[in-house]
Image (cartoon, grey):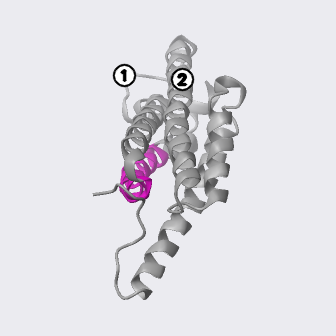
Amino acid sequence: MSFYGKDSNQALAQTSAPMLLAAGLLFMVFLVALSRLAGNRSHLVLVGGTVFTVFLLVAAIAGNIFAITADASDVFPVRPETALIAILLLDVAYGATIAAMVGAAVLLFAVWRVSRESRAVPGWLGWFGFVVAVLSLGGPFSAWATPLLMALWMLAAGVVLIMNARVAQRDEGQEPAVAPGTP
């Protein structure tokens, strides 16, 4: 309970929650660009990415709402009696993070299949995604590593998307590379 009693931790919660929410919405923009590469598997990429985003937003809200409420409300003090609420909200945030990683596994398995079937996604990115997807299905056993690995995968995929767009612009203003079957 001493964590929530400190003003600095309450301020951290107030700044991290909107940043996580904004990051989730920006991920949706990334998701649309990634789904264009997925071709006939774009629905799996979109569904998995949307599930990932929704549960990540739930985790962001549930993990920070206790500190935000404690800071903004005089009628909700941080005391041992309210500790059960904090524990419950942190458990909800943890469960939502695990559920988000299951959605990420669907997205990553779809990108892995695209990398195996076409050259729209580099093979190394697909295999890296496959490893992260398998670890994501480990649930509580790998929950500490999978969000970090997913972040690394997103950075790598973002670089690939940017490089594909630049190559396409050099090749006489064509659109970025997409997999066969994309409308």
Task: Please check the rendered image and state whether residue 16 is part of the magenta-colored stretch, yes or no.
Answer: yes
Tell us which disc is closer to us: 2 or 1. 2
Q: Position of residue 2 (x, y in %)?
A: 63, 28
Query: Pointer 2: what residue?
Result: 95
Dot 2 and dot 1 residues touching (CB under 8 Å): no
CA distance separating discs 2 and 1: 28 Å
Q: Position of residue 172 (x, y in %)?
A: 37, 88
Front in this rendered view, residue 131 or 171: 171
Q: Position of residue 66 (x, y in %)?
A: 46, 28
Q: Say which residue appears at 38% left-offset and 44% top-offset.
A: 46
Secondary structure found at label 1: loop
Graded by Cα atoms within 10 Å as few (under 14), some (14 to 19) or many (20 or more), the crowding at tag 2 reads some
Q: Is residue 95 above or below residue 34?
A: above
Q: Is residue 155 above or below residue 82?
A: below
The reply to whether residue 7 is visible in this rendering is no
Front in this rendered view, residue 88 or 8: 88
Query: Pointer 1: what residue?
Result: 75
Q: Say which residue appears at 55% left-offset and 44% top-offset.
A: 108
Magenta range is: 14-38
Graded by Cα atoms within 10 Å as few (under 14), some (14 to 19) or many (20 or more), the crowding at tag 1 reads few
